[in-house]
Image (spheres, rainbow, N blue to C red):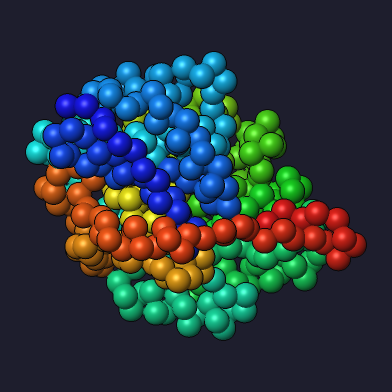
Amino acid sequence: MKITRIETFLVPPRWLFCRIETDEGVVGWGEPVIEGRAEVVRAAVDVLAEYLIGQDPLRIQDHWQVLGKGGFYRGGPILSSAVAGIDQALWDIAGKAYGAPVHALLGGPVRDEVRVYAWVGGDEPAELTEQITAQVEAGFTAVKMNAAGRTPPLPTPAETAAVVDRVAAARAVLGPGRDVAIDMHGRFGPAGARRVLQAIEPLHPLFVEEPLLPDQGHLLSSLVAATSVPIATGERLYGRADFLPALTAGIAVAQPDLSHAGGISEVHRIASLAETYGAQLAPHCPLGPIALAASLQIAFATPNFLIQEQSRGIHYNKDADLLSYVVDTDPFRFVGGRARRTALPGLGITVDENAVRAADRTGHAWRNPVWRHDDGAFAEW
Ligand SMILES: [Mg+2]
């Protein structure tokens, strides 16, 4: 079998898909994207495709070495995301060629269901109560929310109290038997994060995500030591070498993104590395159906898996949502807040190629907002 064609599709709301075709008619799909820089990743995929045309798609490990390392310069969001999407598509092809789901090729399933969480927004506790109630009624047992919007490096007592009020409102709806995870987006700064963590500690969050920016990774170990709240990070880390210091610092939850951190191949390795540190895996995935399908395949095959993010109804999903580009929506039907394992080959989904081609004609130019503090200085989003 040989790779004959590699195409990319820029589809709303903010995604990029790639389709790899072979001379035997087997087709694989991947999602190589960095949110807000999709066109740049598309160009990277085009460059990497030069090497892959004519190659045997089943030599996934070897291709990963060449694509990830063969250009001398390595790592980072753009290259690692391009490699990630291609890697997903190659695993999809391998599964279809061998007639097996990807999790079977990774050693077989270690679980039959995968717990997923729902995203909830809402700046006011009342809005949050309403949204979480709806998710609980839909069967979810865990939600994730942002700690705060634009935040000064050191929050005032009122700003800290507002975070506590929102998390308390979430806990009031969820009760002690469900979970709330909090995303800080690195907005508070190290001292602010320490203070807010202490304030929300009694509310027992499942984890707090990105209390520090990746640039401040050297401070992670002291933050971990200062709180009993499980610390999570990883959506802005791009491979094993990036995760090693965070794991050594004692994070409880590693959050590689299947579309950023080198795909199924590398996240499988990151999961094993995390296991040696007693850390759990909770892949980042506010993305599309292919990235989520790849995440679920990893979840079914990873012993130290915790919970999966998914983007249904997330605030980013304007003009299209998780189910817009799949023929069979069953793999993403969450019952009791869980996805069920299927024996479908490859990534286990059927991409609606006509819908993808039509959406690519519209495309998108999604960018994250640029925030500024009251004094006009740049603020973390
Ligand atoms: Mg996050």
Q: How many marks?
A: 0
Name the quadrant containing residue 335.
bottom left
Quadrant location of the C terminus?
bottom right
Q: Is residue 105 visible?
A: yes
Q: Is residue 218 left or right of residue 287?
A: right
Q: Residue at x 39, y 23 (%)?
A: 51
Q: Position of residue 89 (x, y in %)?
A: 30, 39
Q: Position of residue 269 (x, y in %)?
A: 37, 28
Q: Is residue 39 left or right of residue 290?
A: right
Q: Position of residue 308 (x, y in %)?
A: 37, 52
Q: Nearer the viewer, residue 221 or 60?
A: 60
Asked if 137 appears above or below 32 in the picture, the reply is below
Q: Is residue 144 visible?
A: no
Q: Residue at x 66, y 44 (%)?
A: 212
Q: Nearer the viewer, residue 126 or 339?
A: 339
Quadrant location of the N terminus?
top left
Q: Is residue 225 left or right of residue 310?
A: right
Name the quadrant containing residue 165.
bottom right
Q: Residue at x 43, y 61 (%)?
A: 361
Q: Position of residue 288 (x, y in %)?
A: 39, 56
Q: Residue at x 77, y 56 (%)?
A: 379
Q: Is residue 122 left or right of residue 153?
A: left
